């Protein structure tokens, strides 16, 4: 008697697994790992293709920049390089919040936060960020 529900359960688990795999493949294709240049070094980060396109200031040159992509999440920053230390570090740099003005820049666009990415070792600035919100 208990055999039929058990069989059903198995099927559900299998479907769940394949859904997860499908999601992972989608996410894998959407993200790209890039070297983003800042004023005092660079950050190696994983970005969506939309953000990657934003970080490219000059369309024909394969150079990417920190400033246009907003505030990156810590988990997406894998490594950074500090020009002052002349070395690469594993993991994300530190955030240093400059101001949180909540100031309207353009129609419906608000500057929420402005700050820098700084080196864990020597506290020099790796690059800057600005975080916007659409209202
Ligand atoms: Zn440093």
Image (cartoon, rainbow, N blue to C red):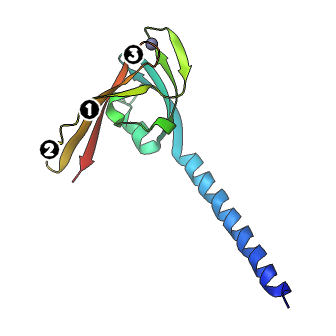
* Residue depicted at 41% across the width and 36% down the height: 72
Q: Residue 62 or 15: which is nearer the viewer?
A: 15
Dot 3 falls on a residue whose secondary structure is loop
**Residue 123, disc:** 3
User: How far is disc 3 from disc 2 in space, using C-alphas?
Assistant: 33 Å
Q: Assess mark 3: CB under 8 A from ligand 1?
A: yes
Closer to the camera: disc 3 or disc 2?
Answer: 3
Residue at 44%, 39% in the rendered image? 73
| Residue 65 visible | no
**Decide: marks 3, 1 in contact (CB < 8 A)?**
no
- The kind of secondary structure element at disc 1 is strand
Single out the residue that lies furthest toward the bottom. Answer: 1
Position of the N terminus, as image quadrant, is bottom right
Q: Residues within 10 Å of mark 3 (few under 14, many from 20)?
A: some
Q: Nearer the viewer, mark 3 or mark 1?
A: 3
Percent of width and height locating residue 93? 45, 25
Find the distance from the CA under tag 3 to the CA under tag 1. 17 Å
Q: Which residue is mark 1?
A: 114
Q: Residue at x 14, y 44 (%)?
A: 106
**Lateral position of residue 98 relative to residue 53, left or right:** left
Residue neighbourhood size for the residue with mark 1, other residues' Cα within 10 Å, grouped as few (<14), some (14–19), many (≥20) = some
Q: Which residue is mark 2?
A: 106
Q: Position of residue 67 (x, y in %)?
A: 33, 29
Quadrant of picture, ligand 1: top left
Residue at 47% over, 8% down: 85
Residue 49 drawn at (x, y percent): 46, 43
């Amino acid at each position: 008697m208990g055999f039929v529900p058990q069989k059903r359960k198995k099927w559900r688990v299998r479907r769940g697994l394949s859904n997860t795999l499908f999601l992972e493949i989608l996410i894998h294709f959407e993200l790209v790992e890039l070297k983003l240049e800042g004023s005092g070094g660079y950050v190696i980060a994983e970005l969506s293709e939309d953000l990657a396109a934003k970080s490219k200031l000059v369309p024909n040159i394969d150079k990417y920049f920190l400033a246009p992509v907003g505030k990156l999440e810590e988990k997406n920053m894998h490594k950074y390089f500090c020009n002052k230390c002349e070395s690469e570090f594993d993991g994300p740099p530190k955030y240093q919040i400059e101001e949180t003005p909540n100031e309207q820049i353009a129609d419906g666009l608000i500057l929420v936060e402005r700050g820098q990415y700084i080196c864990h070792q020597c506290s020099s600035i790796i690059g800057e960020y600005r975080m916007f919100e659409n209202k």
